[in-house]
Amino acid sequence: MQLNGLIFTLPKEIKLLIGAFVIVLSIGFYTGLLFVGETSSANPNGIEEQYLGNEDDENAEVMRFKKSPQEMLTLVHNHILSMSIIFFLVGLLVSITKLPKKLKTFLIVEPFLSVILTFGGLYLLWTGMLWMKYIVMLSGILMTLTFTASTLIILKQVFHKD
């Protein structure tokens, strides 16, 4: 079965379903990023402070405490499961777009690596591997860029007039 470009041949109602899904999914994804920006200042030291606390900083504007083991396991569990489903569905949609094979493969596989590096990295940061904050930041940025590229490609192709 030829998948490359299949998106162009789908019935209009399926294209509308895909478009609506990708738009609503994107709203949820970017709302999550706004939350990250509010809670961690979207920088490596803010990420560290969010999970390890800042009790030693007398000048901190907002007091934060180290996350408990239960909080960390819940966060890692929930995010890895939900993000794997999100990227599986986005990957299925990318698989039917018309793209060069290497780019398509990258857009399909990379988010799963970033999910493991981001949320596994948060757990390792929490255990004391402080340098993981940089890996978390970079993998989170790459995950976001990949999500953005994938959804823009899907939307462009799903609403393309034949």
Image (spheres, grey):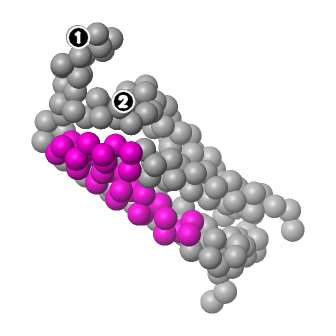
Three-letter amino acid code of the residue under disc 2: Gly
Q: CA distance from mark 2 to mark 1?
A: 16 Å
Number of marks present in the image shown? 2
2 relative position to 25: left or right: right
Q: Residue at x 18, y 19 (%)?
A: 56
20 relative position to 158: left or right: left
Q: Residue at x 66, y 64 (%)?
A: 14
Q: Residues within 10 Å of mark 1 (few under 14, many from 20)?
A: few
Q: Specify the quadrant of the image occupied by residue 114.
A: bottom left
110 is within the stretch colored magenta: yes
The quadrant of the picture occupied by the N terminus is: bottom right
Dominant secondary structure (helix, strand or loop) of the stretch shown in magenta: helix
Residue at numbered disc 2: 46
Placement of 67 over or under 145, stated as above or below? above
Three-letter amino acid code of the residue under disc 1: Glu
Q: Is residue 72 visible?
A: no
Q: Earlier in the sequence, mark 2 or mark 1?
A: 2
Please provide the residue range marked out in magenta. 106-135
